[in-house]
Image (tube, rainbow, N blue to C red):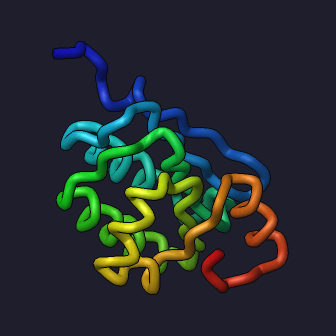
Amino acid sequence: MSDQTGASSIQFDKVGDAAVARPQMKMMDDQSLKTLVRMIEELSPESAVGGVIIDLSRVTILPSLALGLLVQISNTCKAREQKLTLAGLQPQIRKVFTITRLDRVFQIADSVEAAMKSAVRGGSEPS
């Protein structure tokens, strides 16, 4: 059992007017999911963050609890008029979003860079 805390296993940076969360684990466990939710909820609506990008490129296992928490994060972002984009989904994770039709709910980009470009263009089409 690892001694990782949720905060140390998620990098959180501000890039331009976007907040970028980068989970650094293969499986997002309950603790890391709660940490991610807390980090995003702590973003002040006045913080000039126009978008939130969650880079899931290292995540290969996403429990069903994660899907519900991602919807919660999406609702938080919508209430603040912040664009949420999920980036870098591994094929097996992307398949989960397709099967559950959550790919119609979330903006999905191939990479953080693509998500940043989409934010600059103001696009809303899933990639």
- With 52 as the anchor, is 75 left or right in this view? left
Q: Answer left or right for 13 relative to 122.
A: left
Q: Nearer the viewer, residue 54 or 40?
A: 54
Of the 4 image quadrants, the one containing the N terminus is top left
Q: Position of residue 62 (x, y in %)?
A: 29, 52
Which residue is painted at 33% across and 71% down in the image? 71
If the image is split into quadrants, where does the C terminus sit?
bottom right
Query: Can you see residue 76?
Result: yes
Q: Is residue 20 left or right of residue 61?
A: right
Give the residue at x 46% y 32%.
24
Q: Is residue 79 something that shows in the picture?
A: no
Q: Nearer the viewer, residue 59 or 119?
A: 59
Which residue occupies 58% across, 53% down?
88
Classify 31 as above or below 53: above
Q: Position of residue 111 (x, y in %)?
A: 67, 55
Total marks placed:
0
Q: Examine the rendered structure and indicate whether residue 84 appears above or below residue 121.
A: above
Residue 57's place in the image compared with 25, above or below, is below
How far across and down, in percent of the image, does residue 61 sit? Answer: 31, 46
Q: Residue at x 68, y 53 (%)?
A: 112
105 shown above or below 58: below
Q: Nearer the viewer, residue 93 or 79?
A: 93
The image quarter containing residue 2 is top left
Q: Is residue 110 left or right of residue 42?
A: right
Q: Quadrant of the rendered structure where residue 85 is?
A: bottom right
Percent coordinates x, y for residue 40 in the rendering? 44, 54
